[in-house]
């Protein structure tokens, strides 16, 4: 703890001992505000950001930082603020200063290296759409993504035509690529989600023509990432789960 000072509450006249708190400097030494010699006290009647902090200089390394200004609550209800000497510090010898890091040693990596930009493949055919989706999944970090052997539906969707498209599968992902000319349906989205649940893997949907409104709403509820396949070959996320997948990767 820092130094202590006897203070008198201006509201009720009670006397108290205030001890300045010690804070850790980045060098490892402790610093504490130096209370003014006359221990001037004022009651806090309003709060302002500039009044809440005081600059304290570390005696060990000379670094000046801002720390909370010493305050004390009186039993009468008054909050007391004690004056401090500006830009000073009380050295505290409780800990050895931490050794400085040599400039030639890099800091440890705290985040994954950013992925390189995805290289799109122009989509001219349904097969190009499948290829693009597979490459994109691998770019996201899913490994060993291959076609699951389901037939590729390249026709126009009609009611009752089933779930069109082709499946992609990896050890930790199941995806459906829908290259048809109509928006992906609610049933298609729910079927893919159920497939992922059964296999205990992530599910991802790619559609060339977008999604029906109820399909998008359901995908949001289920946390299923939805992507639209741009003809330039750059899949675009169209809901929150897809944005999160792009940000975090597999």
Image (tube, rainbow, N blue to C red):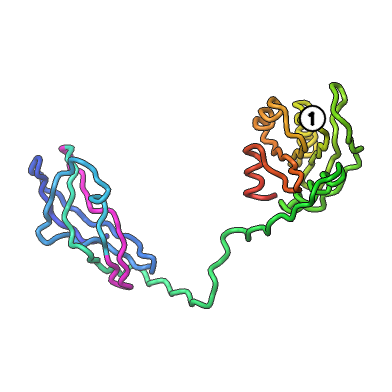
Pinpoint residue 244: horizontal percent, then vertical percent.
63, 44
Pinpoint residue 250: horizontal percent, then vertical percent.
70, 49
Pinpoint residue 140: horizontal percent, then vertical percent.
71, 51
Residue picked out by circle 1? 182
Query: In the image, what residue occupies the spot 27% across and 48% down?
Result: 49
Quarter location, residue 206: top right
**Horizontal relation, residue 247 to residue 67: left or right:** right
Verify whether residue 60 appears in magenta.
Answer: yes
**Quadrant housing the N terminus:** bottom left
Q: Answer above or below: position of 78 versus 216.
A: below
Query: In the image, what residue occupies the spot 66% across and 45% down?
Result: 245
**Horizontal relation, residue 23 to residue 38: left or right:** right
Q: Answer above or below: position of 126 versus 144.
A: above
Q: Answer above or below: position of 142 versus 220.
A: below
Outermost residue to the top:
159
Quarter location, residue 90: bottom left
Q: Which residues are magenta?
A: 57-76
Pinpoint residue 172: horizontal percent, then vertical percent.
77, 46
* 86 or 27, nearer to the observer: 86
Verify whether residue 191 appears in magenta.
Answer: no
């Amino acid at each position: 703890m820092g130094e202590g000072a006897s203070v008198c509450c201006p509201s009720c006249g009670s006397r108290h001992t205030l001890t300045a708190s010690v804070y850790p400097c980045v060098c490892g030494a402790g610093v504490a505000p130096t209370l003014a010699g006359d221990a001037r006290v004022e009651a806090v009647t309003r709060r302002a950001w500039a009044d809440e902090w005081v600059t304290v200089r570390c005696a060990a390394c000379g670094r000046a930082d801002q720390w909370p200004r010493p305050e004390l609550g009186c039993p009468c209800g008054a909050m007391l603020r004690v004056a401090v000497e500006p830009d000073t510090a009380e050295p505290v010898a409780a800990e050895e200063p931490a050794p400085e890091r040599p400039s030639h040693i890099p800091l440890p990596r705290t985040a994954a290296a950013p992925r390189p930009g995805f290289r799109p493949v122009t989509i001219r055919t349904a097969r190009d759409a499948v290829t693009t989706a597979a490459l994109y999944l691998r770019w996201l970090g899913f490994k060993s993504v291959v076609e699951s052997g389901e037939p590729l539906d390249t026709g126009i969707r009609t009611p009752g035509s089933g779930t069109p498209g082709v499946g992609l599968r990896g050890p930790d992902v199941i995806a459906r690529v829908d290259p048809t000319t109509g928006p992906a349906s609610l049933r298609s989205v729910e079927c893919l989600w159920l497939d992922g649940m059964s296999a205990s893997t992530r599910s991802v949907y790619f559609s060339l023509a977008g999604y029906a409104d109820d399909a998008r709403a359901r995908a949001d509820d289920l946390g299923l990432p939805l992507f639209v396949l741009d003809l330039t070959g750059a899949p675009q996320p169209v809901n929150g789960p897809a944005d999160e997948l792009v940000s975090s990767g597999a």
